[in-house]
Amino acid sequence: MIQKPVLIVGGGIGGLTLSLCLSKEGIASRVFERRGNFAETGAGIQLSPNCMRVYDYLGIVDLIRSFAYEPDCVQFLDGKQNRILAEIQLGASLAEDYGFPYYNVNRAQLVELLARLASEDDLIQLYPGCEVTAFGSVGSDVKIEVDGNDFDGSLLVGADGINSTVRSQIFGSDEAVFTGHVAWRAQVPIESISSKFHNKVSRVWWGRRKHLVAYPVQNGRLLNCVAVVENKSWASDSWHQPGDLRELTEEFADWAPEVQEIIKSIPSSDLFKWGLFHRSDLKTWRKGLFVLLGDACHAPLPFMAQGAAMAIEDAACLALCLSRSDSVKSGFEAYEEFRKSRTQKVKSMSARNGRIFHLSGVAAFLRNNFLKVFDLKVDRFLYSYNVFEINERLGNKGSTLL
């Protein structure tokens, strides 16, 4: 059914994972990335069991493990008193419950690995430093223009993030809406902070209208930190705007000494600040021979650490739907049917988490008392998900499905 390569716009985690999943199903692809190389900023991300199942399917769990960090638990703490409100076990217990581990990784290292594997795959061609300037369909093919050169394929996938050019050209321009949240991110060398942080614990400090997350990455050599504050005056969505360490210090000046120690240890040259934005839900992710994936169609806020995981699940699902459908149209329909309700629920839950994180007074007291029960329910919904169960509904054609 797929005679010509799948054209993928965007060489981040979603686009590269899709290319590898397509190759696993015997489908060729071309990946176009506008940046000069397949590299990401050095932010940390979390890979939960639901998406690690996809990387197990690709046979690369051991490669990820070589630079990942597996936390034993995540603690939720009062921001001013450093009092533990709840603790959820990860590590071996989570792997036993859901079949796969929970990893903290550096985004740049993951993208570097995926790009290397794609570059070594005969069915995948990578085009770094190539911006897609125009695209359209001609008969049963798609054609794109990249820096004056034309490429054709069976279909086009927009995996180019929340500010997706493919999305705006297919469905028209819709402005991203500022959520009223501003975030800082940084990575702290673990040797620069006290030994109390030299353990396999992820931490989330909560407080009124703000929170701070810290967890180890790079085999425990760095502490990835993200602070989120409600601030209505911010409007930039750049990930690369330098942050002011003095401003961040002032925001958390009355918080626990442990929080202030982390902030004071941040190298000022490694602090970045950005606003959190969201886009309205699309009625459909597909039009003709074009379809969207990941943040391009359902970008969640970061309050469940599931943005990358949803793109990874999307990639596996789309590859399977295309390989098992009689036409691109039916493959797209199946993909959207399988993915839309789950991603919308995750998006809604992420937004709700942001509100829960920043409660105060009586509302915070109630949250703290019901925290453990609430999070256990979230875990089951998120981590037990197995994208490969769609095989039974699509029909097994004897390929490489688990």
Image (cartoon, rainbow, N blue to C red):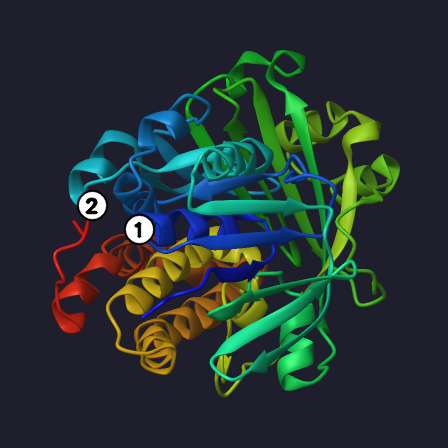
Q: Position of residue 208 (x, y in %)?
A: 64, 56
Residue 50 numbered mark, or none:
1
Residue at position x 40%, y 35% in the image: 103
Q: Is residue 182 visible?
A: yes
Residue 57, compared with residue 366, is above or below; it is above
Secondary structure under badge 1?
A: helix
Residue of label 2: 98
- Where residue 373 sits: x, y (%)? 28, 57
Compared with 7, 112 (above or below) is above
Residue 331, located in which quarter of the rendered image? bottom left
Few, some or many residues within 10 Å of mark 2 (<14, 14–19, 20+)? some
Please state if 286 lies on the left or on the right of 170 as rendered: left
Q: Earlier in the sequence, mark 1 or mark 2?
A: 1
Query: Based on the displayed image, in which of its 4 quarters is residue 388 positioned?
Result: bottom left
Under tag 2, what secondary structure? helix
Residue type, numbered disc 1: Asn
